[in-house]
Image: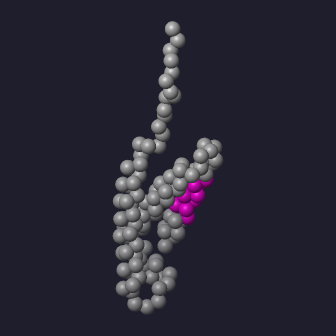
Amino acid sequence: MSSVNYGTKRIVTGAHYGARDWLVQRASAVVIIAFTAIILAQLLLTKGPIGYELWAGIFFFFFMKLITASVIVLVLGYAWVGLRNVWMDYVPAAGLRFTLQSLTVVWLVGCAAWGFEVLWRI
C-alpha cells in the first residue's frame, strides 16, 4: 500500500519570539525614555551656554559612560527588532531579506562602534 500525504508538513519560523521581542522593546523604551529625561533635565537645569564643556561634564564620570553605553546597546537592539520585523513582513524573497538583514547588522555594528568611540573620547 502507498501512504497518502494529506498536506504538507508546515514549518513555522519566527513565531516563537514575538512576545519576547515585544516585551524587550517596551522595557528598553522605558529605559531609553528615562535616560533621555535625565539628560534633558541636566541640560535644562544648567545655566549658561550649552557647549562641549557641558556635554563633557555630563559624561565625564565612569558610571554615566557605563549607563550611556548600555543605552546605546538598548537603542541598537530596539532598532534591530524593528528593522528585522519590517524585512520579515515586507520582503518575501529570502535572499533579498537575508541581504537586507545582513546590511542592517553591519550598519548597526558601525553605529555602535561610532557611538562608543564618541562616548569614550569624552
The residue lying at 54 percent from left, 49 percent from top is 88
The one of 27 and 69 positioned closer to us in this rendering? 27
Which contiguous range is marked in magenta? 103-114
- Position of 29 compared to 85: left or right? left
The residue lying at 57 percent from left, 55 percent from top is 104
Q: How is the image coloured?
A: one colour
Q: Is residue 42 magenta?
A: no
Tell me which corner region of the image, top left, top right, bottom left or bottom right, holds residue 15.
top left
Question: Main structural element of the magenta stretch: helix, strand or loop?
Answer: helix
The residue lying at 53 percent from left, 54 percent from top is 86
- Position of 36 compared to 11: left or right? left
Figure check: 48 above or below 12: below
Residue furthest top in the image: 1
The residue lying at 50 percent from left, 27 percent from top is 7
Is residue 74 visible to the viewer in this orientation of the structure? yes
Give x and y (percent) for residue 58. 41, 77
Tell me which corner region of the image, top left, top right, bottom left or bottom right, holds residue 36.
bottom left
Tell me which corner region of the image, top left, top right, bottom left or bottom right, holds residue 64.
bottom left
Q: Is residue 113 magenta?
A: yes
Figure check: 8 above or below 31: above
Figure check: 95 above or below 116: above
Figure check: 46 above or below 71: below
Give x and y (percent) for residue 82. 49, 57
Residue furthest bottom in the image: 48
Is residue 102 visible to the viewer in this orientation of the structure? no
Q: How many marks?
A: 0
Give x and y (percent) for residue 70. 41, 61
